[in-house]
Image (cartoon, helix red, strand yellow):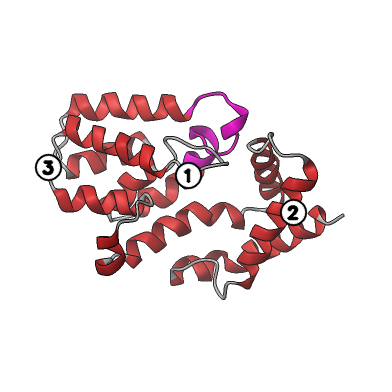
Amino acid sequence: MEEIWKKVCAHYDVPDQVANEWFTRIQQHLSTDSPSRAYHNWHQMMQRKESHLAECTNPNIVLAAFFQYYHFDGNRSCVEQNCEVFQEFCKAATIEDNDTKSLVCNLLGRKTPENEVHWCHDDEANLLQDVDLVVLASSPEEYKHYTTLLRSEYANLNDATYKAMRIKVLETLLLIPSIYATGEYHDKYEEQARANIRSEILELKK
């Protein structure tokens, strides 16, 4: 992951010291030992995304992936907090390109009237989302481990409430013609993801 980070920082001419400091900061923050981010952390989530980000040629997507879950709370949106951290990084890194800053914040989920009218970056958003969802196409054993970690992140919910919420999410995914928005990810991962989701629904309904 460090090489991926260094490469994207080099693209934006980020000073080495700033790049190193922020890599350490992001890694340490995402490595926080907390049940509330049992999956959405450096060891689980980010390492799973590593090979996909290494192949990504769009620096905006890579930047967004590093800040997407800097703050995470399964019970509420952390979009604005994550955009604020990204903007703090841009200030330290002297990234002054407003288009880049706006695009990455939009990829992080910030909605403004302007981007709802003029948004033309579906390809970037789709790929970022597909990388995020690749965990759904894990092997059955890895997927089971993922669902166990995910359950830990909602410790505030009792089993009945969690199961109802999770089933609703999963059944909604199955209704979508294609879980993966890009052709490459659809071809590689769609079938396995749907099989895992169906198995989880059956398990949750027992």
* Residue 104 drawn above or below residue 150: below
Q: Which is more N-terminal, label 2 or label 3?
A: 3
Residue range of the region highlighted in magenta in the rendering: 31-47
Amino acid carrying mark 1 in the image? Ser
Q: Taking 173 as reference, is 187 left or right? A: left
Q: Quadrant of residue 82?
A: top left
- Give how far across and how far down residue 40 sits, in percent: 53, 39
Q: State how far apart marks 3 and 1 are (Cα).
A: 27 Å
Residue topped by disc 2: 164
Marked residue nearer the N-terminal end (1 or 2)? 1
Mark 2 residue element: helix
The residue at 49%/27% (across/down) is 31
Q: Nearer the viewer, mark 3 or mark 2?
A: 2
Tell which of 16 and 60 is nearer to you.
60
Q: Residues within 10 Å of mark 1 (few under 14, many from 20)?
A: few
Return the residue at label 3.
Answer: 96
Give yes or no for contact between labels 3 and 2 (Cβ–Cβ under 8 Å): no
